[in-house]
Structure formats: structure tokens, C-alpha cells
Amino acid sequence: MSSTTPDLARIVSDIADEMRERPDRGEVATYIPELARVGADAFGITVIDADGTVVAAGDSETPFSIQSISKVFTLTLALGMVGDRLWRRVGREPSGSPFNSIVQLERERGIPRNPFINAGAIAVTDVILSGHQPREALGEILRFMQFLAQDPTITIDEAVAASELRTGFRNTALANYMKSFGVLDNPVDFTLGVYFHHCAISMSCRQLAMAGRFLAHSGRNPSTGHSVVSPERARRINAVMLTCGHYDGSGEFAYRVGLPGKSGVGGGILAVAPGKASIAVWSPGLDASGNSHLGRIALEALAKRLGWSIFGA
Ligand code: GLN
């Protein structure tokens, strides 16, 4: 048992209580119709410390659509497959643009700014798909999530995937545009099919915090001893999360929270306190940049009360 645990438990439950009471809840995403069915009332949080102690509050066991949080894991997989050659296909600079923006692609000849905006994540998915059938690539991604979370029950929400497939005109445009520059190797509908499905993976805060533990501990899950990536790679993935994980809200997230983090339009955020903890929060209402409104506020409170910002207490 960690000596910090009683304090951590109190802080986490205080934050969950505070979040439940707040009237400002953000706006649930509606551009993927299936996501609009979720109410804005939910709030969940799970913190897993270095000892593996799980501290949770609120709706921490309810599965939600992880959406763009899946991009952390597809980046990890693609780096494992092709190593630094991945960076020929995608940059690692913040975009300062919305997650689904197309504007930079023309000037930068179809090379997306980073692996976390939609265009970049579609390019990363295309790398994972190469040499495989879409079903195999998707199975690989899902099994990776199950392995990291140590939970074989994690599944894809087919209704969410189908909903995005029907309405994902913007992502289809991004993929076709990149294809015209030769940045995608596979048929556009195959790449998009895998992309929409990995965004539609459902996980709870607890499962997500488990899956993120290797990023908090130099590439290794300290409880199982499983080494997932090298310490150098974990550090670099965290760096990209810090600079690009919240799109055009990344500067604000670094300023307020001070932790590497990745958001998704399902309202989840995975955050990493290096050496200390893996944290997942979920609140479906979003801010103007498409990041969880209360999720960010909760992480800001947590990092502040525990002195966990990587920039100092
Ligand atoms: N699947 C979503 C999309 O492509 C993911 C976006 C997000 O979570 N920011 O639009």
C-alpha cells in the first residue's frame, strides 16, 4: 500500500463530488449521432498509482467511447511496427487547428502535423493496416488494448462505428486528400473502416487508466513487469501527448493541468503523471475545442492538490 493512498482517495472523492455538483457541463458531441445518446451528467475518475493501487470515484466502471484516446495506442503500435520511419508519414508538431481541420494538409503536401489530429491518426492507422486485412489490423489493436488493460472483455461498440461510418464525411475528405499525395498506401475505405472502429472501442476509466500505466512508468507496467516500449519511446509518446493531445486546446491543458494527456470526443481523457500515476477521467460534455470540459477541470484540481504538474508544484 502506498503511503499517499489515504490522501489520494480523499482528494479523488472530493473532486468527484465537486464535479457532480457543477452546473457547467459542456456540450455532448452530436456530430457522431450515436454519441449524442449519452447524457452529460456522468462523471468518472480512476487514478492508479505506482504501486498499482486503484483509487476511483463516480462512474469509473461505466464504459464509454474512447474515440481519439485510441490514437495514443495506435501510435504506440505503429512505432513498434516501423519505428522512427513513422515520422516520414506524420509530423510531431502541434497544429493549433481543430482536430478535424484540413487547412494545413495542402500546404504541407498531405503530411499531417501530428498523430493525434484526425488526419495524422488516419495516416498512422494506414501504417498499421499495411500487409494485413482490415479485420486483422483491428483485431491487433483491440488485443493490444485488452493486453494493456489486462481485461479481455473490452470490445468495440459497433453502433458507434456504424454511426461514424455513415456520417464521417470530413474524415473521408481528409483520407482522400492524403491519398492524393500518396501518403496512404491502402484503399481509403479500408483505412477509414479500421480508424472508425478503433475510435469506437468502449472502455471504462478503470480500464483506460490500467492501459496507460506503461506511459507513467518508463514503458513498463510495474505490476506485471511487462515491458511495452523502451523508456525513450514512452518519454517521447508523453511529449507528443503534452504538445498535441488536446488539439488547439493543448497549450491551455499544459498551462492548467501540466500533464501529458489525450482527450476523445466521447468525453474521456487519459493523463500521465510520470513516475506517479496513470489517470483516466470521463465526463461527456465538451468544451469548444472538443475536449472534456469537466474532465479537464477535474485533472487541473487533481494535479494542483497533489503537486503533480510536470512543471513543478
Ligand atoms: N472518431 C472521431 C473523429 O474522427 C475522433 C475525434 C476525437 O475524439 N477528437 O472525428
Image: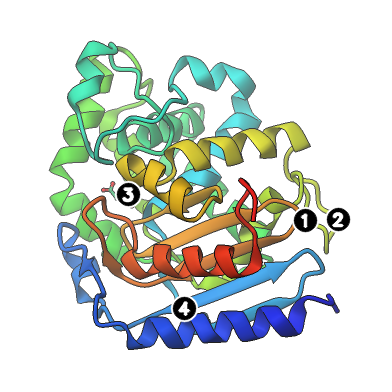
Kindly indicate whether the residue at mark 1 contacts the one at mark 4 (C-beta within 8 angstroms).
no
- The vertical placement of 102 against 266, above or below, is above
* Camera-nearest label, 3 or 2: 2
Q: CA distance from mark 4 to mark 1?
A: 23 Å
Q: Which residue, given by chain and number where applicable, does mark 3 sit on?
A: 196
Kindly indicate whether the residue at mark 2 contacts the one at mark 3 (C-beta within 8 angstroms).
no
Q: Which residue, given by chain and number where applicable, does mark 1 sit on?
A: 221
Kindly indicate whether the residue at mark 3 contacts the one at mark 4 (C-beta within 8 angstroms).
no
- The vertical placement of 311 against 46, above or below, is above
Q: Residue at 45% x, 48% y: name it.
A: 255
Local packing at callout 1 (Cα closer than 10 Å; few below 14, some 14-19, many 20+) is: many
Q: CA distance from mark 1 to mark 2?
A: 5 Å
Mark 2 or mark 4: which comes first in sequence? Answer: 4
* Mark 3 CB within 8 Å of ligand 1: yes
Q: Which residue, given by chain and number where applicable, does mark 2 sit on?
A: 225
Counting from the top left corner in percent of width and height, residue 98 is at 24, 40
Q: Residue at 47% x, 26% y: name it.
A: 92
